Amino acid sequence: MTDDIDYEIDADNLPKRMKKRPLGAPSVIVDDVHITYRVFGARKGSTTQTKTPLLNRAISLGRPDTGPITEVRAVRGVSFVARHGESIGIVGTNGSGKSTLLRAIAGLLPPTKGRVFVSGEPALLGVNAALLPRLTGERNITIGGLALGLSMRQVREHTPEVAEFAELGDFLYLPMSSYSSGMGSRLRFAISTMQTPDILMIDEALATGDASFRKKSTERIEQIRDNAGTVFFVSHSLASIRVMCTRVLWIDKGLLVADGDVDEVCDAYDAFVKGRTGASAGANLT
Amino acid sequence: MTDPKPGVALAPRLTSEEAEALARQSSLRQMGVRPPLGHYIRALWGRRSFIWNLSSSRAYVRNQGSYLGQAWTVLRPILDAATMIIIFGFVFHGSAPGIQNRAAFIVIGSFAYGLFQGIVMAGIGSIRNDLQLIRSHQFPRAVVPLASVMTETVLFGPIMIAMVVLVVLTGFLPDMGGPVYPHWSWLLLPVAAALLAMFSAGVALFFARLGARTPDIANVVPFFLSLGRFASGATFSIAGLTAAGSWFRPLLLYQPVQVFLELFRSVFGNEPLIPMSPGLWLLAAVYAVGVFVIGFLFFWGAEESYGRD
């Protein structure tokens, strides 16, 4: 999954604030979506449990307190309508279900209940696109491009461009397992921006690499964003949300708690985060 | 912990009916539903270079990290066959009555069954092994098991050559019925292998769907595969060892895997008891196409659910 590290963007690296574009027809309709994960082998509180007598344990053998399968309700009934020309930011604490929701909209994680309607092909732009660590960077570009739906010819055309953008140098021909983590995430970012989709979803993509690469990737995203119809943007950086988005959804423990103007929601969220102590417990277990 | 109580109102929520009507009105398409079969097959055909690339990369990665590397692809089945020759060729002399060259009989059976077994095992875990890929990109999910099947099939090329060499060498073993001469029908080996791969792909797709939701399947299937190895007579002759009137004799003789093993043996043409016949080819072709279609439809039936945990 995404590493939820908060990379605050330097103020001078940020682009100019998004202008509100006229709203078009609906492009994404999310209708009461629920997503439940199954986790194997998890037991509630097994690390904090006190020792029970042997006899009691023998009796309850085979009936562990919550069973070997725990269900995690990551998203619990989210509904909204997005229109063409909107840039929508999604905020929430760690484990609140932002990334899961985004995957459901992209059609990658089928919702357990509810429906998602979209126009065109949505694409999730992430720093966590799957790559095969034992293959060379070049091979991974090919596979990544084909997975995105490009043809072999298009992939061949784009390969030098992607390699250059990722600043790999001669490492292009070495297995990905030999890459530094920065190189790996640069390559992932470069691969996932190979094409411009109708609905673009960005998951923490700005948290990639050093300052110079961050500037480069911000520019790239801006470029893509100008061509895409609707943009979803998940980030922990309120500064970049304020700049890049025209509407914000706030999700907490899988529920939509606010949906509206950027500054209003961001201010409320900021106040909530500052007033909170300790990390969030994440999604609800059932 | 404080509950978030923002002073921002939620946008008015649509009911499910309103959402559906609005979606239809602006001609949106529902995500995460199974595409119609025709669309699905066309989309899959469009991704054929993806299947090919994924499978060749997989084959390349397979034996990395050992000194002999890719040589293990060929060495492993040879060692398997050698074990079987020692036990069923030399120790149990009566394992294949009427068969002249028991060692060649065992080599062919063991190699061909290896192809079936390899493909089925690759299919079972394919969805779970590539969960990250499935959750990052959208494509017809059959790409993943089919790429695994393709890997095994392509790797069978060099294995098949080793099989031919080994069969010729068995002619020089003592007590094994004399030399094996090359025959024109050996050219049909790739066709027989393609039919077996197609049949196995159907089985693999079937288990890929089951294994995606229930990882336990991966523990049960190896048991059935080793049972199948004996029920298909990979290392001994079913025709020669089962009683003539028993009810399970026709069941064992005409079950698909046994048919494919017979087909391989008939292609080598060195056993008078196993002649090449159009009936055998027809039966094999029917099994290959039928099982592949059933497996594919079964896999497609749960298309929307792959990637869910």
Image (spheres, coloured by chain):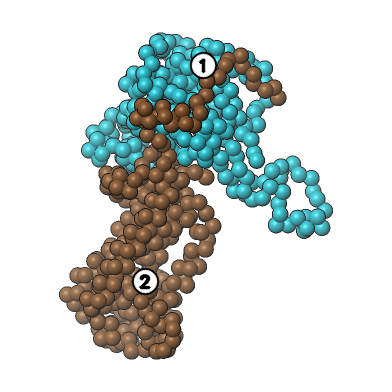
Chain colours: A cyan, B brown
Instruction: Tell me, for residue A260, which label it has, or none.
Output: 1
In-front residue for pair B128/B306: B306
Quadrant in the picture for residue B168: bottom left
Residue B127: percent from left, percent from top: 44, 50
* Residue at 28% over, 37% down: A150
**In the displayed structure, does residue B52 sit left or right of residue B302?**
left
Q: Is residue B208 visible?
A: yes
Chain ID, mark 2: B
Q: Amino acid at mark 1?
A: Gly
Residue B90: percent from left, percent from top: 41, 85
Secondary structure at badge 2 equals helix
Q: Is residue A270 visible?
A: no
**In the displayed structure, does residue A29 sit left or right of residue B196?**
right
**In the displayed structure, does residue A43 sit left or right of residue B309?**
right
Assess whether mark 1 and mark 2 are in contact (beta carbons under 8 angstroms).
no
Instruction: Tell me, for residue A166, which label it has, or none.
Output: none
Asked if residue A30 is positioned above or below residue B197 in the image, the reply reads above
Characterize the local packing of mark 2: few (<14), some (14-19) or many (20 or more) Cα atoms within 10 angstroms.
many
Chain ID, mark 1: A
